[in-house]
Amino acid sequence: MGYGIDFAEWPTGIEVPQAVQQLIEKFYQLLDNSDPGIGDILADEIFTSDGVAYFGATPFRGTEEIRNSRANAWNLISMRKHEVLKVYVSDRNASDLLFTARVAMGLRNGKQVEGEFTGRLVISDPQTGSPKLCLYQVWGDTSALVAALREG
């Protein structure tokens, strides 16, 4: 694999298809990239047309909202690196995954923050060669980020 999932612990007994692992890897590569065209790739290649992405507490629903979801993603952040730590499967098709992960961020005010979070990925067509995300949702403690932003 490569970026962001190299050291992830994957479930035993139920295999997460290679195409799903590659989708997760590409998804985090995109989230960690500040290129202004990333929203288009997320909308067209990563999510289903009715997909929902919770970036923080804000849900972005459907292609157009997901396309525009990254417009302000880099206003306060200069660097972001996600790393998936462990993946859990809730069904035999590997279409509903929970995971733990870590993110490190460099802020535009010069501060650095890092923390762990938990998330859920619901995947359309996981057993095919072209799965897509139906849902991305995360939960984490943002107090370190809020404090670092206030300091700057």
Image: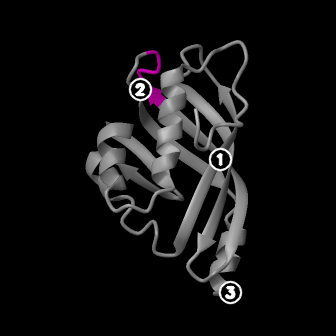
Segment colored magenta: 123-127
The residue carrying mark 1 is 83
Q: Which residue is mark 3?
A: 151
Is residue 126 rendered magenta in the image? yes
The chosen color scheme is one colour
Q: Is residue 25 above or below residue 40?
A: above
Q: With 65 as the anchor, is 110 left or right in this view?
A: right
Please tell me how crowded label 2 is: few (under 14), some (14-19), or many (20+) other residues with Cα within 10 Å: many
Residue 139's label in the rendered image is none
- What residue is rendered at 52% in x and 36% in y? 24
Q: Amino acid at mark 2?
A: Pro
User: Which residue appears at 63% of the width and 34% of the height?
Assistant: 98
Secondary structure found at label 3:
helix
Q: Residue at x 28, y 46 (%)?
A: 63
Q: Is residue 96 magenta?
A: no
Q: Position of residue 99 (x, y in %)?
A: 66, 38
- Say what amino acid the circle numbered 1 marks: Glu
Marks 1 and 2, Cα distance to the nearest angstrom? 21 Å
Q: Residue at x 38, y 24 (%)?
A: 130
SS category of the residue bearing label 2: loop
Q: Label 1's element? A: strand
Which label lies toward us, 1 or 2? 1
